[in-house]
Amino acid sequence: MSEESGSTDRLEQVIRRLAEKTGKSTQEAQAASLGVSDTALSKYLSGDQIPRERTFVKMLTSVKIPTDEHLKYLAILKSAKAATGSEASRESGRFARVSLEDGPSRGVGRSKQGVMRRMSPMSIYVKIGVVVVCMVCGLVAWLLLPSSESGATPSAAPTLATSARCALVNAPSSPVFAEIGDLSPVKFKNSGDQVRLVPSEPRTGADGVVYQAVALPDPRDSSTGIGWMPKADLTLDPPRCAGPGKRS
């Protein structure tokens, strides 16, 4: 029998004698008399757990072990604790040696440090950044594309096919809609007003009217910055577009 095993066995024997000194016939009653739980006493007796010093002193006092003898019993407790700690240290050292010999490629005894290196904070931040960028790009695309519920007939997504950059209103009064199919316009443009065009192909609404995309910079008019006007009410990129004419 090793010295460590002997130390823990002596402690188990001492605790067993303390339980017997209570005079109780069942382990549950013995535990209650010693001031510990039935589960704790069972672990003490099996060697699976060592009581704390304060708990051990309480157990000694409960069966009226003289105070001047406590030091003798406490020495047995400390010896068992030291032996248990020594065994744990050796086991930890053996585990570390296996980790170094086998290496991470074999999947045996991998250290926590190796795992943390593979999961470095920088790599986590990079992955989070990529996800955030993708979400923002998707949101912007969703805002810029016309809604399928707006009443417009299906058509191609906005392109740079329209080369015109501005237009003049040629109707006495022309409505500007935030979305094709809206019942009410957000504003009206008058004859001679100058509007800035958004690079996009014209779209045909459910009413059969062809609409042209124009800029609506005021967020109160359109959250996307884009509006739609009847193309027939606009003269696209006229020679005097950069000259006289009221800005939109």
Image (cartoon, rainbow, N blue to C red):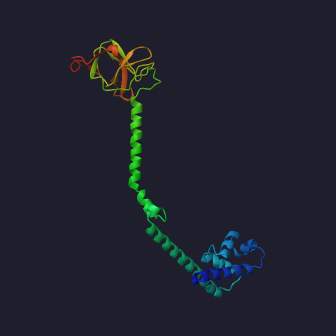
Above or below, comparing residue 72 to residue 183 in the picture = below
Residue 109: x %, y % from top left:
49, 65
Residue 60: x %, y % from top left:
67, 81
Left or right, residue 149 beside residue 130: right
Residue 164: x %, y % from top left:
27, 21
Q: Quadrant of residue 188?
A: top left
Viewport quadrant of the N terminus: bottom right
Left or right, residue 165 beside residue 55: left
Residue 116: x %, y % from top left:
43, 60
Residue occupying the far top of the picture: 172
Q: Which residue is drawn at 41% across and 48% down?
A: 127
Q: Quadrant of residue 245?
A: top left
Viewport quadrant of the C terminus: top left
Q: Which of 70 and 199 is in front in this view?
A: 199
Q: Quadrant of residue 139?
A: top left
Residue occupying the far bottom of the picture: 68
Give the total of numbered labels.
Answer: 0
Q: Nearer the viewer, residue 40 or 155?
A: 155
Above or below, comparing residue 233 to residue 53 in the picture = above
Q: Nearer the viewer, residue 95 or 207?
A: 95
Above or below, comparing residue 115 to residue 22 in the picture = above
Q: Residue at x 39, y 46 (%)?
A: 129
Q: Can residue 60 be seen in this view?
A: no
Above or below, comparing residue 17 to residue 97 in the picture = below
Left or right, residue 233 beside residue 18: left
Residue occupying the far right of the picture: 25
Q: Can residue 108 be seen in this view?
A: yes
